[in-house]
Image (cartoon, rainbow, N blue to C red):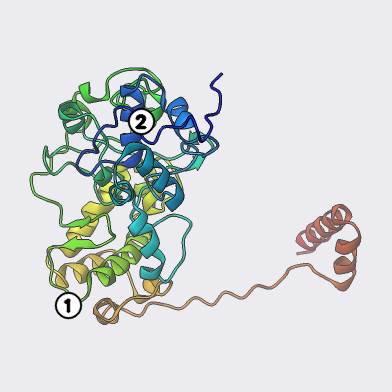
Amino acid sequence: MVSKLTSDSLPSYWPYPLTPKPGELLSSWLARNSFYSGLNPYRFCQRLLPNTPIWDRDIDRYIPIKVAEELSLLSGISCTIIESMTFGVMQKNAYSNWSEIESVTPMILSLGMHGRSRFHFGLQYCPYCLNENSYFRKCWRLAFNTHCDQHGCQLLDACPFCEEKIIPHRAEHVDLCWKCKRNLSLSNVSEIAASVIPKKQRLSVSPDGVICCDLSLGASSTAILRNFRSLIKVVVEVNHDKLVNASGSKKLQFELLRVNARKEITKILEEILAAWPESFHKYMVRNNVTQRKFSRSKYDEFMTCEIEKLPIGRKVHRVYKPVVYTEELKNLKRRSIKQYRVDRSNTLLKDCVDA
């Protein structure tokens, strides 16, 4: 059992801190340091930061200032560099860029953290990059990134051997699977992810939340990002059945999807943006999309003017009329919900028989 370190015995730095790699995630940097020190990441962080939870939160998404300052003091790495290894800036600016507040930060893949467990495939990797340099990059957590620009192969979001989620700090080394212990960088990409994309993808997101797009749409970067994020919801609704089959889940929020489903969405967005705005109208007309599909979200002027050119669509009036809800049943529901259900069911059955 590791005893808690006191403030007197706590060193002002750890003996051999490794320098962060270009574009490295904070969790990857901490894991590499722990393995280099001969400790597993849990014990390593417990000895450095007693009573400070590290691995039961998404520290790549956001790290408290106090924790960043303590890591800076212990490692000798500046606080600015430590914060740059997270999506803190994007996290802070996310809700000022989006009118709708969501539980998941837009454009950052969700890990689905619950204690030490993960329920989503939120960390991707390129086997070639991992083989060349064993650390996990920030760009692999961005939802639009579905392939490696350098090697042209599709990113993997699970161990190719056992299909488990990628959790480097639970493994014996950064590039090993925590479940089957096999080397993630030795996977045969030509068989596992053969979809080579020779050109650079049209859409990408920088760590500070700015979308990079090779189109001149006469709008700011944040406006483009906000509008295309809402456009994704329409694409998902139009291609619902196809995406359910690709993802294996009915939860189709973009940041929760696996790489194959996100690849399909990205491919559709590429088609829509290919010759804007003609390609946008061509796709919407082919799929019978009307203005009604866009009514749930707010759009900026450059999108609104194109949406208004689509057919208005038929307005559906839905009026809820309770079948059985008399004053007697209303009073009974307050007294006994069980008896209310029985009496209501009997009344409905009687009405059906009489009909």
Residue lying at 38% horizontally and 68% vertically, measured from the top left? 98
Label 2 SS = loop
**Residue bearing the label numbered 1:** 218
Q: What is the residue that sits farthest to the left in this orientation?
A: 198
Quarter of the view holding residue 239 = bottom left
Q: Residue 210 at x, y = what percent?
A: 25, 62
- Of badges 2 and 1, the one in the foreground is 2
Q: What is the residue that sits farthest to the front in this orientation?
A: 8
Residue lying at 26% horizontally and 36% vertically, measured from the top left? 125
User: Upstream in the sequence, badge 2 or badge 1?
Assistant: 2
Q: Is residue 208 rendered to the left or right of residue 167?
A: left
For the C terminus, the quadrant is: bottom right
Q: How many marks?
A: 2
Packing grade of label 2 (10 A; few <14, some 14-19, many >=20) is: some
Q: Report the amino acid beneath label 2.
A: Trp
Residue 294 seen in the figure: yes
Task: Reply above or below: 243 against 306.
Answer: above
**Residue bearing the label numbered 2:** 14
- Closer to the camera, 342 or 292? 292
Task: Reply above or below: 209 against 124.
Answer: below
Task: Reply above or below: 161 against 125.
Answer: above
Q: Report the amino acid beneath label 1.
A: Gly
Label 1 SS = loop
Q: Residue 143 at x, y = what percent?
A: 30, 50
Q: Is residue 229 rendered to the left or right of residue 302?
A: right
Q: Residue 253 at x, y = what percent?
A: 41, 53
- CB under 8 Å between discs 2 and 1: no
